Image: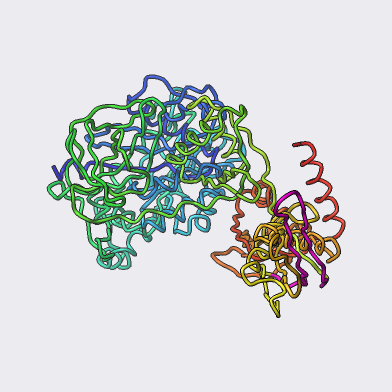
């Protein structure tokens, strides 16, 4: 059994969108005989991108999985999205891979999401290797790309292959480990060849550098190297593999997926040098008391699995994808969700192969499998045979943009909420909340495209149309002038009348103070039992301010005088009097509009700092200061929320996708006069239109 685990490989293809991950996966599957034709993203016929939204956009939106076998090894490929809108679907899957293959565009080099993927590899201590793809393209450059990867991936890069020819003339590679050279024909078939004469000196230097890099990892080899003794190929390979497993460096190889050049090298490279679940070693879990527990990939231990993905199907129900961490899982049985403390039962064990699902009879540690219709299990949960342990789940990526959502048909109000709730189960990058102030349901995600694709999914899966719009800003109102007024409610209509009379002082308080109510009634001019009613009246009236109907904040109301009637006074009458008093005071107390101010932290490459600061200033922002982290600058600023609603795509375009930001509510502040006037006019027009 353990021999089977040693021949397993779980490889995540990671990198920026457009680098060619899906095309590379298709080429590998074609080379392995899994498919009999080479799928093309442009033609919408790939095994890996099969969702309608992926076919339409010609890009990966979800992580897809497929297995192939090569030289008695079983490899599970994970094709992860590289677009920042869908990167949360990658981040949840990286921890269950045993290594990462960073696919780099040979023309553009490593981009923003490659850096994000590399950060995940470092966080999970995963080995990896670099595949510089598209080397047949104009302006592609292998040396420039591998050099750029050093800083982008925060790791030493050791090239083990060098391209023969460049751009349109790219036709093969030289392997510095074996010293062999291969050229490919028009059908992508390799043939051995001599190292081109014009490359001989460069390859000799590259081999020397490679040997030096490997020898540094082993004292015995280093001694041999320094004394000029020859190091055998077997010694080199063994030490090189150990260096890869220890993530001392990332090896680099060169390919063209469309021309099938170098594709046959990848499975051999994965088998020979990438880790098995046994090489990956122990996992860390927490017991019921929060103490760390070691979980080994032992097939004879009790079952433990980690759920890293959920697929929701309106007909088949929920599909939970998980990695078996330890133990051997049978084709059916009872398990425990220790995260939710719920017992679950499954009747079928599945293996995912693109859009297909295959029934299997058992799963060993390291296996990526799925089961259907677990009642309480979601992404991030731990499943066991009963042992109370839990594997910590990665934090979901924070949303960066929000939209108010509504059904296109009024009658679909309930259906849309149910549909969104189910989509939330499979997409950890989404967040839903109800804003009671603006009376809007707000869906937040990783970008505009993310929200648009979610709307398409909801339409396709649940047949519900969803409209999206920029959410309303929850403004506030306050006052700048102290004023004393009367509020009197008097009504006579047969029998008992209604009588309430109060005098209040309304005065402004400093920002963030909220609302204060003070009772200064003396001599019983208003009975004690009616004072709370005055406060209620003021509170309720203040929820709809005088300028544009926004809640009023940061003011104090003191009730200091009044009168009552022994028969006609009541709590309701004094509540009305309090409301009237507030409305009378609000008109003359210099009402002022306030807007929410966000504390924003923007992390950008150093060369973008000036542009970003200028842009924040143009958004009425106030820069507080700067910090630095990992060769990037962090700009801290206070910016009005209304100016940040569409910031995510703007930041992306200004930084080439390399900028990220977080924001949280900081305070309310006064809206400038000219803007205040426009907002008030707009809100009133919207209310008139709605009525």
Q: State which quarter of the image contains the N terminus.
A: top left
Q: How would you classify the magenta stretch by its main secondary structure?
A: strand
The structure residue drawn at horizontal position 83% and vertical position 55%, both measured from the top left corner, is 675
Which part of the image, by quadrant, shows the C terminus?
Answer: top right
Give the image location of residue 492, x and y in percent.
77, 53
The image shows a total of numbered marks equal to: 0
Residue 638 in the image: state x and y as whole percent: 69, 64
Does the rendering let one see residue 283? yes
Magenta stretch containing residue 500, yes or no? yes
Q: Nearer the viewer, residue 319 or 661?
A: 319
Q: Is residue 612 visible?
A: no
> Residue at the bottom extreme?
523
Task: State which quadrant residue 588 falls in.
Answer: bottom right
Q: Position of residue 195 (x, y in %)?
A: 42, 40
- In the picture as drawn, the residue positioned furthest to the front comes out as 495
Q: Could you tell me which residue is drawn at 51 percent across and 44 percent down?
A: 430
Viewer-closest of 88 and 116: 88
Percent position (x, y) of residue 53? 53, 29
Judge from the rendering whether residue 62 lies leftward or rightward of residue 576; answer left or right. left
Name the image colouring.
Answer: rainbow
> Looking at the rendering, which quadrant does residue 249 occupy?
bottom left
Instruction: Give 162 or 398, whichever is nearer the viewer.
Output: 398
Left/right placement of residue 320 relative to residue 686 reads left
In percent of the image, x 45 and y 24: which residue is there? 39
Answer with left or right where residue 264 lies relative to residue 451: left
Residue sticking out furthest to the top? 36
The residue range painted magenta reads 482-511
- Assess whether residue 673 is covered by the magenta stretch: no
């Amino acid at each position: 059994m353990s021999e089977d685990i040693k021949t397993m490989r779980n490889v995540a293809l990671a990198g920026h969108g457009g680098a060619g991950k899906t095309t590379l996966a298709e080429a590998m599957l074609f080379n392995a005989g899994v498919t009999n034709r080479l799928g093309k993203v442009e033609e919408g016929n790939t095994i890996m991108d099969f969702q309608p939204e992926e076919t339409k956009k010609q890009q990966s939106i979800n992580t897809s999985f497929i297995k192939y076998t090569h030289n008695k090894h079983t490899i599970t490929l994970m094709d992860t999205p590289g677009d920042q809108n869908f990167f949360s679907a990658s981040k949840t899957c990286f921890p269950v891979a045993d290594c990462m293959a960073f696919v780099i565009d040979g023309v553009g080099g490593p981009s923003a999401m490659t850096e994000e993927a590399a950060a995940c590899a470092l966080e999970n201590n995963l080995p990896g290797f670099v595949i510089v793809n598209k080397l047949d393209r104009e302006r592609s450059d292998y040396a420039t790309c591998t050099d750029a990867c050093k800083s982008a991936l925060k790791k030493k890069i050791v090239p083990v292959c060098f391209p023969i020819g460049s751009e349109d003339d790219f036709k093969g590679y030289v392997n510095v480990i074996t010293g062999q050279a291969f050229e490919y024909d028009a059908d992508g078939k390799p043939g051995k060849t001599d190292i081109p004469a014009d490359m001989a000196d460069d390859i000799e230097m590259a081999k020397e550098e490679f040997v030096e890099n490997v020898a540094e990892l082993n004292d015995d080899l280093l001694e041999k190297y320094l004394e000029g003794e020859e190091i055998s190929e077997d010694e080199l390979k063994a030490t090189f593999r150990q260096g890869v497993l220890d993530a001392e460096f990332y090896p680099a190889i060169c390919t063209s997926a469309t021309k099938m050049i170098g594709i046959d090298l990848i499975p051999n490279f994965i088998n020979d040098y990438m880790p098995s679940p046994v090489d990956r070693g122990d996992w860390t879990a927490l017991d019921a008391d929060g103490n760390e527990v070691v979980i080994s990939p032992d097939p004879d231990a009790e079952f433990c699995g980690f759920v890293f993905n959920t697929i929701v199907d309106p007909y088949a129900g929920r599909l939970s994808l998980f990695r078996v961490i330890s133990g051997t899982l049978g084709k059916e049985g009872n398990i425990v969700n220790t995260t939710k403390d719920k017992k679950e039962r499954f009747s079928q064990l599945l293996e995912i192969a693109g859009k297909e699902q295959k029934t299997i009879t058992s799963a060993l540690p390291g296996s990526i499998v799925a089961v259907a219709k677990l009642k309480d299990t979601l992404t991030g949960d731990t499943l066991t045979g009963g042992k109370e342990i839990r594997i910590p789940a990665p934090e979901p990526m924070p949303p960066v943009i929000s939209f108010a959502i509504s059904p296109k048909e009024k009658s679909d109000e309930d259906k849309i909420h149910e549909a969104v709730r189910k989509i939330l189960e499979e997409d950890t990058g989404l967040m839903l909340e109800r804003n009671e102030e603006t009376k809007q349901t707000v869906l937040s995600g990783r970008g505009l495209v993310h929200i648009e694709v979610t709307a398409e999914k909801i339409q396709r899966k649940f047949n519900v149309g969803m409209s999206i719009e920029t959410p309303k800003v929850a403004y506030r109102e306050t006052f700048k002038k102290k004023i004393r007024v009367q509020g009197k409610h008097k009504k006579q209509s047969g029998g008992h009348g209604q009588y309430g009379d109060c005098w209040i002082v309304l005065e402004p308080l400093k920002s963030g103070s909220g609302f204060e109510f003070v009772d200064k009634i003396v001599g019983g001019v208003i009975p004690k039992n009616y004072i709370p009613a005055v406060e209620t009246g003021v509170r309720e009236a203040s929820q709809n301010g005088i300028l544009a109907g926004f809640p009023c904040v940061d003011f104090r109301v003191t009730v200091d005088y009044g009168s009552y009637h022994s028969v006609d006074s009541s709590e309701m009458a004094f509540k009305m009097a309090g409301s009237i008093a507030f409305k009378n005071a609000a008109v003359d107390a210099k009402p002022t509009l306030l807007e929410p101010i966000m504390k924003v932290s923007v992390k950008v490459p150093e060369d973008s700092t000036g542009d970003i600061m200028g842009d924040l200033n143009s958004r009425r922002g106030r820069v507080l200061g700067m910090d630095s982290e990992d060769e990037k600058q962090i700009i801290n600023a206070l910016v009005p929320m209304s100016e940040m609603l569409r910031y995510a795509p703007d930041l992306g375009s200004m930084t080439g996708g390399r900028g990220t930001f977080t924001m949280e509510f900081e305070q309310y502040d006064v809206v400038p006069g000219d803007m205040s006037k426009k907002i008030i006019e707009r809100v009133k027009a919207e209310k008139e239109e709605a009525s």
